[in-house]
Image (spheres, coloured by chain):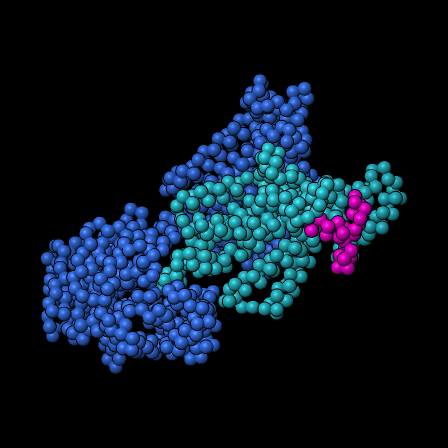
Chain colours: A blue, B cyan
Amino acid sequence: MKAFFGLIARNRLALAGGIVLVLVVLLALITPVLPLADPDVTNTAERFKRPFSEGALLGTDHLGRDLLSRLMWGTRLSLAVGFAAAIVAATIGAAIGIVAGFYGGRTDNLIMRGVDMLMAFPYILLALAIVAALGPGLFNALIAVAAVNVPFFARNIRGITVGIAHKEFVDAARLAGLSNTRIILSEILPNVIPVIVIAMSTTIGWMILETAGLSFLGLGSQPPQADLGSMLGEARSALITNPHTSVVPGVMILVIVMSINLLGDGVRDALDPRLKSGALSRPMAATMVDRKGPVPEASGEGLLRIDDLETQFHVRDRVYRAIGGVSLSVNKGECLGIIGESGSGKSVTALSVMGLVASPPGVITGGAVRYDGEDLIGAPYRRLREMRGRNVAYIFQDPLATLHPLYRVGDQLIEAIRSHRPISKDEGRAKAVELLETVRIPNAARRIDDYPHEMSGGMRQRVGIAMALANDPDVIIADEPTTALDVTVQAQILALLNDLRASRGLAIIFITHDFGVVAQLCDRVAVMYAGRIVEEGETQAILDNPRHPYTSKLMECVPELGGGKRHLAAIPGLPPVVDKLPEGCAFAERCHKAQDACRAGDIELEASGERAVRCLYPVEEGTA
Amino acid sequence: MTGYILKRLLSAIPVLLGITVIVFLIMALIPGDPATAILGSYATPENVEKLNRDLGLDKSLVQQYFIWLGNMLTGDFGQSFALNRPVLDEVLERFNATLILAGTAFVLCSVLGIAAGVVSAANQYGWADKAITFTVLLGISIPSFFLGMMMILTFSVNLRMFPVSGMWPIYGDRDIWALLNHLTLPAIALAVVATGVIARLSRSALLEVLRQDYIRTARAKGVHERGVIWRHALKAAMVSIIPVLGIQAGFVLSGAVYIEIVFQWPGVGRMLVDAILKRDILLVQGGVVFVAACYVFFNIVVDVAQSLLDPRIKT
């Protein structure tokens, strides 16, 4: 609760709204004891006095009544009616919603049909119809405004109640023999009250506006009594000659409703957990770059070289070091595997290459990514966009989520081509069919008009690959492209990628958590743990003889076909959270060989020939 | 698609019937005797009784409802006693004016609202976002009738850019320019609140979509950021924006009543308020049923538009 008020207080606009609202309500409350003129005493000799004139701070209206006094009394009335309407609507609506949600079945069906029917009316029209029946008058306007808002509350509260009515504590109360009424009052109601209050805070502004509207039309408060709406309605005929009589009540309505809305928004934001985590932030076109240190020298050859790359996630005051100093390279026609558990930083490494890490919260804080010698970290967006898809293309996991659901696959392919080459739609279409044939989609000319949801998982991933091939890139980064697919389809996709690599001389970076896949496809493999590479080398050498304890544990996790009921060794424990990385080896906590030295300080990635390992006590040859 | 539209039209029939029942019941609640209201309090009891018989008010409520419904189905909405002309003629004529006003406002609020929402989301937390967010808040907090009055004061009275009120000039040609000249201020005043609501929703819908995987795919294949936002993100966001457009269409249509009063626009809303004040029941009933029916029709249009946009919806 304290945190909640803290959040509202931090939101300066909400705070301002709250303060203004409290002031207005206080003024309205003490109006009767203020030394004001009688709001209803007419004095036609003094009519239409300007604001700030003698004896009338805000001037007088068309009957010579003191505007300040009328404003205060009108505000009081408007607020009272608005709040009353909100309470009436919330009470009746909540009662209906709770009954419908709690009893369910036919009761629910019947009630909600009625509610839907009422919601089929535009609400101003419904309010007009109700006032037409009851006759003009402030009390009738209150009833009308409350009535048209009942369905809104009923529907919201019913939704919440349905969720609660099947919770364990309600069942427990039933088993204890409590009556339905008791259960509703003691178990359901306390749980829906917060929702009712929030719903009220978002609708009360509307209700004040609606009541003012009815009064403005002459259907609400009747003379001489006036709320803000009828003051405005009466002033309308003198709008041109004496605008101040209109401005005074109008501005007051605006101030009240605006302060309520500001406060309501603040309440809503304070209650939305997604805002706190930054999950509602829009990812920018390219990852933010904030390179602290100097740009590292290229440490070797390679078509695509990553040197000492560091990418972090900045969430509020926390820093998650997703990758901390990764160096990799891949050559033409070569396939490099990156393997590791989820959260080890393999995808972030891959996405950092073309600045595709969602940002905020992602920030590239160091290192270099060189394509053909050109450093891409900090390259202007225009350059990155040119290279995306044309030089370096991506294939992602789960093609149902990564293809746009509302565009035909053909159009998405054509768009990929036309993003880099100005060709006509017809040419693009022909090229798209050709691409689909390349990835062995049968009936390519027909399937090109399919939507993603009309295809099978394997076909969709073929489309994903076709899209990556659209502009003949030199490097393809495949981020777990087969994880969402079943085994036979997985084998087909791997074979396809392997063929493409051979026929087009593609460089492939293949990200996976599956050693089986690595064995089939990759020339070299890098093992990642907690954002760093812990072991690297030729695939066969690593498979035969893993040196880092983590690598060997990871390989033990792979079940072998025909291996019988072999003991499947899961790695005990979980990877460390990357905002609190331990000193020394990040794997030490889960490692059976760990010694004190492992936790002492930074451990280098020791290279010897093609192999490199980041371990003080590597697994000896032949013991794995 | 045709089948789907037919299905949606058929499913509207019970809703329309429900609306007539609600309108009828509300009107049946009216205290006092309509005949007395028409004839005035000095009418003889014989005259009142005769009029009651003529109006069918001596029959049971159920009978009255079905007679009223049956008549409406044949296009007979009854006679307005205050105007002394058929309700349907009056409603249709007034509705034409309302449709011009509300239609223009709807186009304005859809286009401006979505554009503002997109710009706001694309520049999240930037100055454009902050400016739009604040303007939107102001827009949804100002009563449209007050805004309309201030616009008249500023643009008609002080700057003399637009006429003060009405739909047509009293003298001169009734051409499209005259209409636009009269239409500008009321259409804007009517559109402001709906624009704010649509802009808010578009912003949050777009922010939601921008974090989806397919947006990353679009960027990965090298689509320009403009295309990412206006083609990929907006199209996906429209799935949640379109239902709100439907709701706002109804809101603009019924909210026109305030604007019609302020700008002396000869629309159906002003007619309804006059009819309510004069207790012209048949005119109120006819007008309300007619507008509500249009609202139901909008909802069908929304559903159809939704199914055209989203191929995953089974039609």
Task: List the single residue furthest toward the top.
Answer: A54
Left or right position of B247 against A578: right
Task: List the single residue furthest toward the bottom.
Answer: A562
Instruction: Give me the residue at 65% from left, 39% from top.
Output: B163
**Residue A270 on the magenta span:** no
Q: Is residue A87 visible?
A: no
Left or right position of B265 against A431: right
Residue toward you, B114 or A56:
B114
Residue B92: x and y in percent read 72, 52
**Quarter location, residue A397:** bottom left
**Residue B76 on the magenta span:** yes
How many numbered marks are there?
0
Q: Is residue A244 above or below residue B121?
A: above
Magenta segment, which residues?
A: B71-97
Q: Is residue A243 visible?
A: yes
Residue B27: x and y in percent read 72, 48
Residue toward you, B60 or B128:
B128
Instruction: Give me the residue at 18% from left, 66% from top.
Output: A301
Instruction: Give me the residue at 46% from left, 69% from top.
Output: A425
Residue A445: x and y in percent read 46, 77
Q: Quadrant of the N terminus of chain A?
A: top left
